[in-house]
Image (cartoon, rainbow, N blue to C red):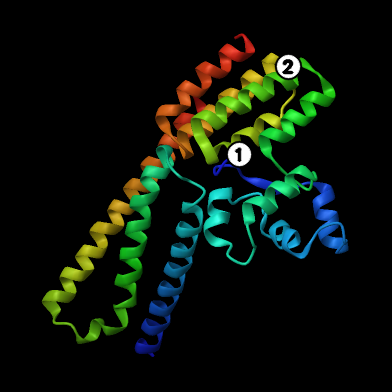
Amino acid sequence: MRPDMVLSRTPRGAEILLNRGTEISTNQRRALLVVDGKTTVANLEKNVFWVTDLISALEELYAMGLIHDGASTINVEAGMDGGAGRQLKVQLAAIARELLGSNAERIIKKMDEAEGTPDALEQVLLGCKKLIKLTINEELADTFLQRGRKVIGK
Amino acid sequence: MDFNVTTLLNVAAILIMFYCLYLVLSLKSRIPGGMVGKQWNFLTLLVVLFTIGYLTTPFSGQLPDEILRLVVSSIFVFGAVYVAVTVRLIFNVIRELTE
């Protein structure tokens, strides 16, 4: 599990947490509780002292499909849909992660919400470039746009 | 009456400045860098400075006139810098979004 990953609960994970189901152990429940869709694995590891062997617990929850990260959601959906648009989004998400690390989540979310056509993705890339330039890193914004355009063939 | 109005204004100013401090600090984690992120650090510094300055206003009556005038002038200067940085930031954001 990469330290820069930001994990979120899947609908099933949220349901188990609400229903207090017996499918998971107390330690796994504690780990599931701290997954908030904002904090990186590295920060969770640093701050959450009340969960025994947090990384193992998170890996177990991940394997059970109770938590996910942004990129894997796209991967799963791409596998299910098999659509070209989804495949493009997976590649764009990988570029965002490579360039922006833990700050890529907002960008991946924006791309995930867009249509899968090259034209729609180009518009999203332009929007993402502006967002990156304004709030993440001025230098990486153009690199992201250029590499993204290559992926969608524009 | 004058004293009450002055105190009331001072308290209001301090409360508003604490609210500003809360806003700049809570937004800071969501702007790790970029054009806004760079300016945000400077704006945060100015808000911290203003908060400290505002907190001292209840004691301004005890200061000599000379020092008091210097403090007021400093607040004016930093206020002008704050406005300039904010306006330039808005200008850059709008320019970036309309490109």
Q: Which residue is mark 1?
A: A105
Give the amino acid at mark 1: Glu
In depth, the one of B87 and B24 nearer the eye is: B24
Q: Residue A74, percent across and down? A: 73, 30
In depth, the one of A36 and A41 nearer the eye is: A41
Residue sitting at x 74%, y 22%: A86
Quadrant of the snapshot with the N terminus of chain A: top right
Q: Residue A151, percent across and down? A: 60, 14
Residue sitting at x 25%, y 61%: B76
| Residue A117 image label | 2
**Which chain is mark 1 on?**
A
Q: Is residue A115 above or below residue A105?
A: above
Residue A40 visible here: no
Residue sitting at x 58%, y 62%: A48
Q: Are marks 1 and 2 in contact (CB under 8 Å)?
A: no
Q: Is residue A143 above or below residue B89?
A: above
Give the amino acid at mark 2: Thr
Looking at the image, which residue sits at the far left?
B66
Residue A68 visible here: yes
Helix, strand or loop at disc 2? loop
Q: Is residue A117 above or below residue A99?
A: above
Q: Is residue A54 above or below residue B16?
A: above
Helix, strand or loop at disc 1? helix
Quadrant of the snapshot with the C terminus of chain A: top right
Q: Residue A89, percent across and down? A: 68, 24
